[in-house]
Image: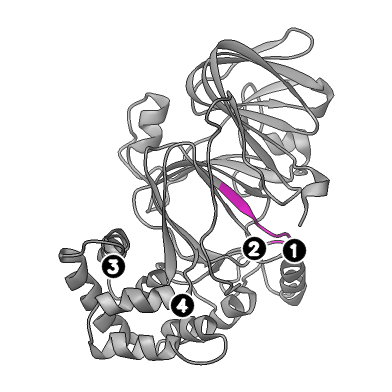
Amino acid sequence: MLLSLSNVPRDYAWGSPTLLADLEGRTPTGGPEAEVWFGDHPGDPADVQGDGTLDDVTGGSLPYLLKLLAAASPLSIQVHPTIEQARAGWARESALAATDPNRNYRDDNHKPELLVALSERFESLSGLRPVEDTLRLLDVLGESTGVAELASRLDGQGDVLRDTIGWLLSGDAQAVVDDIVDAVHTAAGSASGEWAATLRGVAAIAETYPGDPGVVVALLMNHVVLRRGEGVFLRAGLLHAYISGLGVEIMAASDNVLRGGLTPKRIDVPELLSILDTTTGEVPVLRPAAADAVTVYPVPVADFSLRRIELDDASVVIDVDGPTMVLATVGRVVVSGADGERREVPVGTVTFATPEEERVTISGRGEVFVAAPGDPAAEG
């Protein structure tokens, strides 16, 4: 069975007023348009053309959630738990109501995710930078009291990143945060060389979130700029934040988020620190295939897989091994089932193939992303 899916953009404040409208070739609504969800998550199940929502079809069993994401300003710095941490947290909070503001865990699942850029530039913070590199960055900021205090803490013993992030978010470091942000603004104004882009990026974040200690947490993270078709996989425990741009995002079907700054929402610092992975290093960028119509973005989880297919008046046959989505992002594309049923896929919408289809044919001229459950052997 083939189903046509759509949804209304969610109006989170950080959403872009134009990116999704430009993608779909329509007039903007005039407000922020942040995310379009294609899934059966109870928070916003996709609409099925003709009648009902996707959860009526799947019973809420879909292992992944596919999204279009359009950011005009930074999302919160955040981290997601492993499945073991999620199960323990869910059980620990079982007595709390679903709407209780003290609840951290909305379900008992992990939330690894993959983001692939659709805009020519997608800016993000991904993972923690090696401490020795951050100390070199701080040298560019001069010798103010706040910068010296941060450098001293990072040059200490033990798990200095966990300790430093906890201190920054504790509420006891506001004077230091303000001093460092002032130093970032000063340095960004004349920055050149290795740290210029990072300093300008953090200074821009500080303009959006003045006084937020997450600005200094951002200074500890890798500043990553993706080009169109490039992706980044974010594992459990990895600190991250999307800053700006349009992308396709796919994740395990979960709503478990622990925040670490750049937000007016509650931050549970002890719980954040308990699941934070302070392993440092660059997060690998997954690059599009140079000479093939199909790009596979390898991920070490069984919840989802994602492929990007470029079509040039040709057809591509794909096997349907589990519930499969075809999201159109460019051009005119048609999905055909084994029995000859055809569904045109307007840009910004999805054709959903149920497992009994076994295989579908994608034809036309344009670009699609194919989402499906992952390989169980990929779990790791």
Please tell me whether mark 3 sits on a helix, a strand or a loop: helix
Please tell me whether mark 4 sits on a helix, a strand or a loop: helix
Q: Position of residue 364 (x, y in %)?
A: 55, 12
Residue that label 3 marks: 206
Looking at the rendered image, the disc whose residue lies closer to the viewer, 4 or 3, is 4
How packed mark 4 is, by other alpha carbons closer than 10 Å (few <14, some 14-19, many 20 or more), is some
The answer to whether the residue labelled 2 contacts the one labelled 1, judged by CB atoms less than 8 Å apart, is: yes
The answer to whether the residue labelled 2 contacts the one labelled 4, judged by CB atoms less than 8 Å apart, is: no
Looking at the rendered image, the disc whose residue lies closer to the viewer, 2 or 1, is 2
The answer to whether the residue labelled 4 contacts the one labelled 1, judged by CB atoms less than 8 Å apart, is: no
Q: Earlier in the sequence, mark 1 or mark 3?
A: 1
Q: What residue span does the magenta drawing correspond to?
A: 107-114
The mark found on residue 179 in the picture is: none
Q: Position of residue 95 (x, y in %)?
A: 74, 75
The mark found on residue 131 in the picture is: 4
Q: Position of residue 2 (x, y in %)?
A: 71, 20
Is residue 109 covered in magenta? yes
The mark found on residue 236 in the picture is: 2
Q: Position of residue 58 (x, y in %)?
A: 77, 37
| Marks 4 and 3, how far apart at CA | 22 Å
Please tell me whether mark 2 sits on a helix, a strand or a loop: loop
- The answer to whether one can see residue 33 in this image is yes
Q: Earlier in the sequence, mark 4 or mark 3?
A: 4
Residue that label 1 marks: 83
How packed mark 1 is, by other alpha carbons closer than 10 Å (few <14, some 14-19, many 20 or more), is some
345 relative to 194 in the view: left or right? right
The answer to whether the residue labelled 1 contacts the one labelled 3, judged by CB atoms less than 8 Å apart, is: no
What's the residue type where badge 4 is placed? Val
Is residue 28 covered in magenta? no
What's the residue type where badge 3 is placed? Ala
Query: Which quarter of the picture shows residue 292?
Result: top right
